[in-house]
Amino acid sequence: MGPLLKLEDQLDKIVNKSLPPLPSNAKKFMVTIAPWVALIGGVLSLWSAYALWKWAHTLSLINNYTKALNSMYSMYGYGYRAPNSVAQMSIMMWIAMIIMLIEGVIYLLAFSGLKNQKKSGWNLLFYGLVVNVVYGIVMIFTNYGGMGTFLGYLIGSSIGAYFLFQIRSSYSK
């Protein structure tokens, strides 16, 4: 992966040359817990995607009932209109759910590589970090996110990149 390899090298230079290093015992601790953090992160990402899907379908169902009520009220001339402000599932919502699923699968796949201290496991965490930034960008264009959400994802991903690149040297090819 050419562009991601270049990004990885640039981030490595920034983190390891410009920022203060972690103590070696902190790095060892992070390498020890990394597989479990990835496993928990993967499960939570998959659960979040499912919860978002369930929530969006519930809102769509409410919206359908509201439309049916409005149709019934207008047919019988009651003069009442039920509020119809519930948003339908947009394409951005579907994209967000797909990205969360991808991120969850990446983190789950990283578990065994991280447990065996393989670079492939570390690479999957890095790809998950990139996917997380993409998710933040997608959230700019949803009704549920915005620029503040994107900045939160960017800050969180920057902190994650710092820790991720601090332990990079602990993983063998």
Image (cartoon, grey):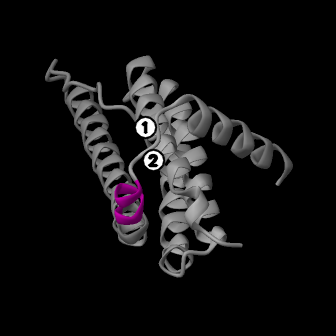
**In this view of the protein, which residue sits in the foreground, 40 or 139?**
40
- Residue 139 belongs to magenta span: no
Q: Are marks 1 and 2 in contact (CB under 8 Å)?
A: yes
Q: Is residue 95 visible?
A: yes
Task: Give the residue type that dot 1 points to.
Answer: Ile
Q: Tell me the residue at 46%/34% (across/down).
A: 20
Left or right: 122, with 107 as reference point? right
Magenta: main secondary structure: helix
Q: Secondary structure at mark 2?
A: helix
Q: Is residue 3 above or below residue 47?
A: above
Q: Tell me the residue at 38%/71% (across/down).
A: 32
Q: Tell me the residue at 61%/34% (across/down).
A: 17
Which of the 4 quarters of the picture holds residue 125?
bottom right
Q: Is residue 30 above or below residue 92?
A: below
Q: Is residue 109 above or below residue 134?
A: below
Q: Is residue 90 visible?
A: no
Q: Which range of residues does the magenta coloring cover?
A: 24-29
Where is residue 94 drawn, in percent x and y?
Answer: 52, 47
**In this view of the protein, which residue sits in the foreground, 131 or 173?**
173
Q: Quadrant of the C terminus?
A: bottom right
- Residue 26 belongs to magenta span: yes
Which numbered tag is attached to residue 163? 2
- Residue wearing tag 1: 159
Task: Give the residue type that dot 2 points to.
Answer: Phe
Count of marks overlaid on the render:
2
Q: Secondary structure at mark 1?
A: helix
Q: Tell me the residue at 57%/28% (across/down).
A: 18
Q: Quadrant of the N terminus?
A: bottom right
Q: CA distance from mark 1 to mark 2?
A: 7 Å
View extreme (right): residue? 2
Which numbered tag is attached to residue 31? none
Where is residue 65 drawn, in percent x and y?
Answer: 25, 43
